[in-house]
Amino acid sequence: MRPLDWAVLIAALVGIVLYGLWKGRRTRDLDDFLVARHSMRWHHVALSIMATQASAITFLSTPGQAFTDGMRFVQFYLGLPVAMVVLAATAVPIYHRLRVYTAYEYLEGRFDLKTRTLAAALFLVQRGLSTGVSIYAPSVILSVIMGWDIRWVIFVIGGSVTLYTATGGARAVDNTNFQQFLIIMGGMFVAFFTIVWLLPADVSFAEAAHVAGRLGRLNAIDFSFDVTNQYNFWSGLVGGCFLALSYFGTDQSQVQRYLTGESVAQSRLGLLFNGLVKVPMQFFILFLGAMVFAFYQFNTPPVFFNPVEAERARAGGRGAEFRALEADYAAASAEKQARAREFVGALRAGDEAAESAAEANLLAADARAREIRAGAVGILKEQSPRPEDTNYVFLNFVIHHLPAGVVGLVFAAVFFASMSSCASALNALASTTVVDLQRRIVSAGRGERHYFVSSKLATVFWGVFAMAFAQYAGQLGSLVEAVNRLGSLFYGTILGIFLLAFYFRKVGGTAAFVGAVVGEAVVLYCFFYTRIAYLWFNVIGALAVIAAALVITAFWGGRGGAEARRADEQ
Amino acid sequence: MSNTPAGQPPRKYEEEPPPFGGSWRALYGAVLAWLAVLVVLFYLFTRAFR
């Protein structure tokens, strides 16, 4: 990076930490620390929700996904607006009326202590580990691309977030999330317009988009129904809706964001704004990746975007062969560039026959380049079982092609994306630890000051835990992947418990608990013995919990009259 | 189950109207209608560049 980039990055990091400390300086009690005294306006709630969901991997991996697989990933988010409407209409008023600090508090009032503790424990395990992964994942990419020491990257992200979150709690988190999200999106817009500006002078933006489209990168929608296909309209709308219901309705890192809203209306508007903006935002980030792809149809890309893996292959036993493949790939890329220009010429002339012929030539040149790349990846597989460079495409492009200052801005955006989701997670982990475990089970009846100090200490504990896990995550291999999958394995079950609580008044605590165990068993069976795409696990898990609980209630009876009335009051 | 801080009156829950848009039902409809518009736009986009 050049001096201007360093200046931008350091100013951004120091500035946001000071801003977080300043905003959180008046946090003096538990209510302030956990829910900012319910003082946030809807635009703060909305951007904090969006910053929490969008981790650094969202901004690194999503453009890479469009580069390699096209834009069909946008369908993953189609169920989100539906979920926002459902939650705004149902969950938000319930949580506000009961004035809970955590989503799991509600479960005790509705069911019993064991159901509350089960849900809180599942959240702590899953979110504690995934926060470590969310620090590790961008750190490893930044360290590989820039040659930085990964331990320092982890420390900068985790340490700075822990500092302002432990000091200012929810108020610091929501305010920094708001500013960070604006800078993240600003960085992405600047990167996008720079990519368009870097296209060859004789190729228009629309023509470059047509090249990307003909090579299968602008495939935003697919209406075919296939339960083994991860990303199509139906899995996105139905599976994505259940996933979003679970994530935004039952995951404390999100529930806490809209609990900071100053009223039901402000919290609702925050969620609805997310429902309006999230899908176009993901479309934009994917389109940015597709334009990086278009850029490389007129410029020569590396055969593999992870520079460390590529260098290791050059120095390995088949190094000469790898270098020969790199030369072949550069030649194939030059051929493809010529065919792309030929296609653009035919497109401009409006000659359909010439356009079809040029498209066939372009596809053939693309197939040839992909064949050579597959050969290079085959060599890489000998040193690493699953060589992967999707996550490296965007940053590799940024450091090699974007001007000074813009590179620093994009790097600041990556740091901020990681910091914002990590800050919300630490705030939520501390809340759940203190409210659902310490204050309820371990040391009940102590003064509020005690729990306020405990919340700060719990934030520090989870920050150190996340950094420690991130330091060793690289050595854990498949465990990291397991943690990433953990969410989709448990979200459906947790959602099922909450849906029972919200909508099935006759179902009691034991039926819900046994239903959760049955639902989880069904999800694990699907995971190990079927090829069903993981988005459907959220639907299957939630429906299995509800079905099992209803059967138990039908055979063994539900809540008594007084108990059911209490549930109705909630 | 209430976390009202000491010294503060219990938070009063009210079904407030939205500050704009008329009613919550209308806002929910607008979000869902916007989703439908996006799906149509994505379909046209996919077709235009196929």
Image (cartoon, rainbow, N blue to C red):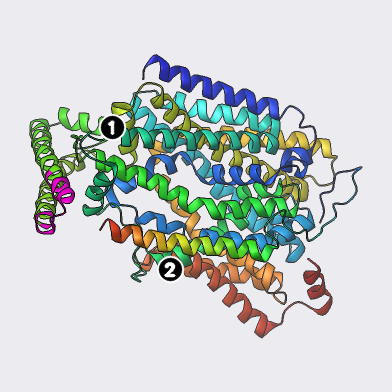
Under circle 2, the secondary element is helix
Identify residue for label 1: A198
Q: Is residue A81 left or right of residue A285?
A: right
At label 2, the amino acid type is: Tyr
Q: Which mark is residue A56?
A: none
Read off the chain for label 1: A
Please name the predominant secondary structure of the magenta segment in the image.
helix
Observer-side mark, 1 or 2, equals 1
Identify residue for label 2: A525
State which region is magenta. Answer: A342-356
Vertically, is A414 above or below B3?
above
Q: Quadrant of residue B22?
A: bottom right
Q: Earlier in the sequence, mark 1 or mark 2?
A: 1
Q: Residues within 10 Å of mark 1 (few under 14, many from 20)?
A: few
Q: Position of residue A96 (x, y in %)?
A: 76, 55
Q: Position of residue A368 (x, y in %)?
A: 10, 47
Whether callout 1 and callout 2 share a subunit is answered yes
Q: Position of residue B30 (x, y in %)?
A: 58, 62
- Residue A1 in magenta stretch: no
Vertically, is A553 above or below B34?
below
At label 1, the amino acid type is: Leu
